[in-house]
Amino acid sequence: MTLEDSTSKKISWWAVVGRYFRREFLPVLTDLRLAIALLLLIAIFSATGTVIEQGQSPAFYQANYPEHPALFGFLSWKVIQVVGLDHVYRTWWFLALLILFGTSLTACSFTRQLPALKAAQRWKYYEEPREFKKLALSAELDTGSLNFLNQILQKRRYKIFSETEKENVLYARKGIVGRIGPIIVHIGIVTILLGGIWGAMTGFLAQEMVASGDTFEVKNIIDAGPLAAGQVPKDWSVRVNRFWIDYTPTGGIDQFYSDLSVLNNQGQEVDHKKIFVNQPLRYHGVTFYQTDWGIAAVRVQFNKSPVFQLPMVKLNTNGQGAIWGTWIPTKPDLSQGVSVLAKDLQGMVLIYDATGKLVNTIRAGMSAEVNGVNLKIIEVIGSTGLQIKADPGIPIVYSGFALLMLGVVMSYFSHSQVWALQKGDRLYVGGKTNRAQVAFEQEVLEILDQLSSQPKNEDRGMPIQV
């Protein structure tokens, strides 16, 4: 086989592939029914990702979605984890749906919307009266002139096209932006899809529980995309200057706050904000939300000893409320001690002896004698629960929504076209539009009325409809 034969076969093979793509695959890809089906699937799985908690531990799903009885008869923790419903927006099949939908819209734009725009920009003069018969609206007048029609159309913001060589013909149009609108809508939707894919690939979600006064780096990542490593902060940290809770007069929680400082590698403050629910801190594309709280530690003093800080842990109360506790030794050999419990940051603590008997209830700053030792509760230290999120795709998504809204507004403009021909003492006028047909008909009738009212040596009445 010669080189020419081999090259000829390769060209022929690519020609076959291209012909198959144009004739078989492309019509399916640009089918409106496929786009609607894909959009419906994306909406269903997006709703699923909203209803089913995302990024939780396996134990969470085993506890909330047991196999017996399974939710709706089939939805168990095994199904959730096998299908990927615990991280819907990062599964390969969900991203594949987004890519396929975006490809369908792009193909539709190139095969339908762009050709429609080019066709709308192409026009020709009608030079014979019979050409007006194919228009949806047309009229033959025995009064009026092209110059007067030109003036009328200009006042109605039509763009006029005429030639000096052909003084008896006229073409006018307005609303070409209405033909551009659907293309902008498609661009906006594709931009939203790209933003969602980029966010899923590069974003991360983390949770941190940090005590007042502590400095932390983002490490406890619970969900992240395959390209998220570059988004995790490495050259700055965050210090919780203070965490506090405002309580209502009845003792309920009104609001909880965290005073945060962003520190560079030299420990210098580069940003500062007090955050609370719906008022997060944003820095370098990373957002810190106030979502939870707890009790981290209690500071105590024995007689005149130095102040000790002992950690407190959340106890299992079987859903009877949140309580934190710790054990405080009252002898150096740890042979005796008391349990200290707290349920909020208002400073009230309960002291129990080794037998589980309540021996005292005191507030922060007060002392009590237990096991022959003067025990003083200096402070109950709270901890803030932060949800930390980075989604680099959000600016892209917002840009896509802006384009989408712009395209929708542009699509409401009607693309209206008007042709006219002056032949002898007869004036032929016709037009068509792609939407708002009734409004366009009314506009054409008003134009015809104005033409009919133009002064003439011999008025022969109203226009004759073709």
Image (cartoon, rainbow, N blue to C red):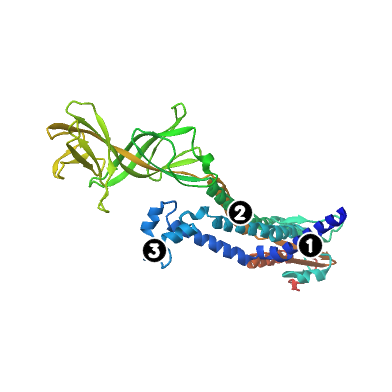
Tell me which corner region of the image, top left, top right, bottom left or bottom right, holds residue 456. bottom right
**Viewer-proximal residue among 423 and 247:** 247
Residue type at mark 1 is: Ser
Give the answer, above or below, for where 259 lies relative to 304: below
Give the answer, above or below, for where 18 lies relative to 334: below
| Residue 454 pos. (x, y %) | 75, 63
Label 1 SS: loop
Q: Dot 3 corresponds to which residue?
A: 67
What is the number of the mark on residue 145? Answer: 1
Give the answer, above or below, for where 78 lies relative to 401: below
| Residue 55 pos. (x, y %) | 44, 51
Q: In which quarter of the image is the C terminus?
A: bottom right
Label 2 SS: helix
Q: Earlier in the sequence, mark 1 or mark 3?
A: 3
What is the number of the mark on residue 306? Answer: none
What is the number of the mark on residue 190? Answer: 2
Residue type at mark 2 is: Val
